[in-house]
Amino acid sequence: MSLLVVVAFGLIIGNLVDRAGQNSLLVSAAISIGLVLGAFIAARKAPRSHIFHGMLTSVAPIALSLFIQLVRVGRGIQTVSWLSLVLVFFLAVSLATLGGIAGGRLSPHKGSLFE
C-alpha cells in the first residue's frame, strides 16, 4: 500500500510539479501520509509485532529510491547529496513506525489463550 502511494505520488505527480513551487510540499505531504497509512494498514492486519510490520512497509520505498539514485549516478545526472538521502531514509522509517504504532493501538485485540 505505501509503495503504491509513494510510486504514484512520487513519480507521476512529482514529475508534474515544479520543484521550486509551493506544490512540491503537497507532494511531500502526500508521500508521508502514504507511508503512515500503508504502515497503519500493515500493522492493523498483523496478528502480532505491529510496530515491526509497520516498519517493514518502509523497506520497499527505500529500496526503490536507492535504486533510482544509483541509476541517476550511473547516468551522470546531478543528484541529491548522500547525506540527505540517508536522512530521508530515517524519515521514511520513522513515519512507517508511527503508522505501525497507530495500527497496533487501534487493532482489535484478539485475546490471549490464557484469558
Image (cartoon, rainbow, N blue to C red):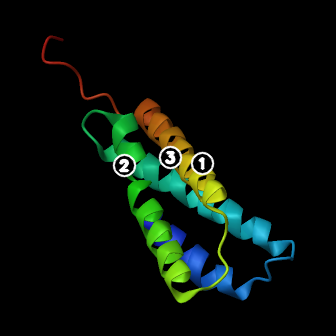
> Looking at this view, is 90 or 73 the one in front?
73
Rendered residue at 35%/33% (across/down): 108
Left or right relative to 66: residue 107: left
Label 1, secondary structure: give it. Answer: helix
Rendered residue at 67%/69% (across/down): 80
Res 93 label: 3
Question: Given contact means CB atoms under 8 Å apart, are the residues at marks 1 and 3 in contact?
Answer: yes
Res 56 label: 2
Image quadrant where residue 23 sits: bottom right
> Is 72 located above or below residue 49 in the figure?
below
Earlier in the chain: of badge 2 and badge 1, it is: 2
| Quadrant position of the C terminus in the picture | top left
**Kind of residue sitting beneath label 1:** Leu
Q: Position of residue 73 (x, y in %)?
A: 54, 78
> Is 109 located above or below residue 18 in the figure?
above
Rendered residue at 70%/70% (across/down): 27
Work out whether residue 74 can be spotted: yes
**Kind of residue sitting beneath label 3:** Val
Left or right relative to 45: residue 34: right
**Kind of residue sitting beneath label 2:** Leu
Left or right relative to 41: residue 75: right
Report crowding for label 2: few under 14, some 14 to 19, many 20 or more residues within 10 A (C-alpha): some
In the rendered image, which residue does mark 1 sit on?
Answer: 91
